[in-house]
Amino acid sequence: ALQGHGTSNYELEFRTKSNETRYLLVNATTRRDAENNIVGVVGVAQDVTEAAQHDRAVAAMARELRLFVDTANAPIFGIDVDGNVNEWNDKTAEITGFSGDEAFNRPLVETFIVPKLRNSVEEVMDNALKGRGTSNYELEFVTKSGEIRYLLVNA
């Protein structure tokens, strides 16, 4: 701000005299005199400690859930509204031979399901996307090596 450029919504972490961590959302604007010379900075800060702590707690929970899904001892896979893979955990990769990178954004049914089941699997997935679940549905996945793996899924 002393160079004539303001700063908006900068989060500043600091410690209080009692060693408590606080977070401020700071805006700084150049202060000028009558001749438009820079004479200082005007700063406005808002204490956002509770919101920042909440955001960090949510992020930590998301990391824990991500780790739980990735390392689960069961295959977990998911699709987006277009039917493309958007979730593929380590166990799914182990069973199919396809890494997450190889599977992501590829159409699940057309890429990984045996041809004879594609229509019925498509219907199960469409129902799941509409909030109508299916329990204990047997899928036949084609692995990277061309083998068939049978998975019992809930969608």
Image: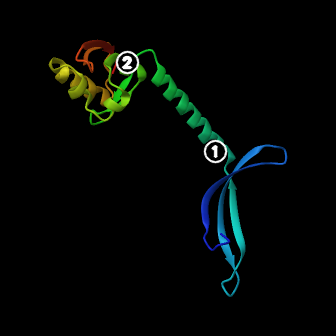
Q: Nearer the viewer, residue 103 or 36?
A: 103
| Nearer the camera: disc 1 or disc 2 | 2
Question: Hey, which residue is sitting farthest right in the picture?
Answer: 17
Q: Which residue is mark 1?
A: 52
Under mark 2, the amino acid is Glu
| Residue visible at 28% across and 13% down in the picture | 149
Q: Is residue 9 left or right of residue 40?
A: left
In which quarter of the view is residue 110 placed?
top left
Q: Are marks 1 and 2 in contact (CB under 8 Å)?
A: no
Q: Is residue 27 left or right of residue 104?
A: right
Q: Nearer the viewer, residue 13 or 3?
A: 3
In primary-sequence order, the first of circles 1 and 2 is 1
Q: Nearer the viewer, residue 60 or 131?
A: 60
How far apart marks 1 and 2 lie (CA) works out to: 38 Å
Q: Classify 113 as above or below 150.
A: below
Quarter of the rendering occupied by the C terminus: top left
Question: Hey, which residue is sitting farthest bottom in the picture?
Answer: 35
Q: Which mark is residue 31?
A: none
Quarter of the rendering occupied by the N terminus: bottom right
Q: Which residue is mark 2?
A: 94
Residue 129: image location, x then y, percent = 31, 30
Question: Badge 1, how many Cα within 10 Å: few under 14, some, many 20+?
Answer: some
| Secondary structure under the numbered disc 1 in the rendered image | helix
Under mark 1, the amino acid is Ala
Residue 52: image location, x then y, percent = 64, 45
| Residue visible at 84% across and 48% down in the picture | 17
| Residue visible at 73% across and 74% down in the picture | 40
Residue 118: image location, x then y, percent = 18, 23
Question: Hey, which residue is sitting farthest left in the picture?
Answer: 116
In which quarter of the view is residue 79 placed?
top left
| Secondary structure under the numbered disc 2 in the rendered image | helix
